[in-house]
Image (cartoon, grey):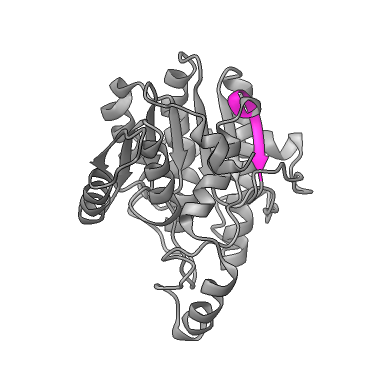
Amino acid sequence: MSGQQFLNTLSLSSKKVLVVGGTSGIGEAIATKFASLGASVTIAGRSEKAATQIISDFNKSDFEKKGSLDFKQVDVSLVSNCKKFSKEVASNSYDYIVLSAGMMRMGGRNETSEGLDDKMALHYYSRFTLIQELAPLLAKKSDGRILSVLAAGQGHLVDENDLDLKNNYGVKQCADSCTLYNDLMVESFSKAYPTVGFTHAFPGFVNTPLANGNKMPWFIKAPLSLITPLFSRTPEQCATYLLSSFLDEEHKTGWHLMGQNGEPVKLSASHTEAVRQRVWDFTVNLIGKFP
């Protein structure tokens, strides 16, 4: 049975889904896929204009199990915004949460008004905060699941004494750290909420605005524009692969690292119990500083 065939067997009319980072790329495709299976989906992101177009296009579609899409505006690059947003949506009683907000840029550390690097904030701190705030509510559901889309199994520890990369920041160092931290994050939260399914997924090479290098220097953007259409998947294909595994029985509880075809991926060499506990303690302390 193909991934789409499996999804076609599902009816999600009773499910409520939150997709953070759902106004473009993989997040948009996942949100639309959920809604096409009957779910009530909230897209959370910065661009109301993009969300309005996505919702309009969906409302014109003729999916057999058509659910619904709505929009909540939020900038999750700030931890304080994530906490406020979590309180605002808590009453919605979501069954599934997907975290896919991201960015791609070159250059050094670029701090937000909270003193955190903007890439690390989107790729890790915001996700940790939203899970910390909303996982207790999912634990009350009969089938609560959380999916973080970044790069499962691809990360490495840069410096255990500089987890925020204040002194060791670089493009690769940031990517290595955030991807490892996401791996450790799903394991840690699974220990705290064993009835909830936590998955970190590597989507592979997907033809999104990020992959096209729209915010990259011309010497990177030019070759990407040629390579991407030849070797990448569409966001819709990616959503099908990821959700067909994420929604199976195996992913209902526990923690999982998922590859681009929905297959399990190996742990990074840096993924140890000592590192997991160190990163957990560091992050809980850091996030706790913001209102």
Q: Tell me if residue 3 comes above or below residue 117 in the rendering.
A: above
Q: Is residue 214 visible?
A: yes
Counting from the top left corner in percent of width and height, residue 182 is at 59, 43
Query: Which quarter of the image is occupied by the N terminus?
Result: top right
Counting from the top left corner in percent of width and height, residue 127 is at 47, 41
Image point 46% across, 69% down: which residue? 105
Image point 64% across, 48% down: which residue? 152
Image point 56% across, 77% down: which residue? 227
Counting from the top left corner in percent of width and height, residue 96 is at 45, 29
Left-right relation of 269 to 62: right
Q: Residue furthest right?
A: 269
Q: Magenta stretch: residue 237 in it?
A: no
Q: Magenta stretch: residue 253 in it?
A: yes
Please state which of residues 63 and 213 is positioned toward the viewer in this rendering: 63
Please state which of residues 277 and 37 is positioned toward the viewer in this rendering: 37
Counting from the top left corner in percent of width and height, residue 110 is at 42, 63
Q: Tell me if residue 185 comes above or below residue 232 in the rendering.
A: above
Magenta-highlighted residues = 251-258
Q: Tell me if residue 273 comes above or below residue 157 in the rendering.
A: above
Left-right relation of 150 to 210: right
Q: Tell me if residue 176 comes above or below residue 83 in the rendering.
A: below
Image point 76% across, 39% down: which residue? 272
Please state which of residues 187 and 239 is positioned toward the viewer in this rendering: 239
Please state which of residues 133 and 64 is positioned toward the viewer in this rendering: 64
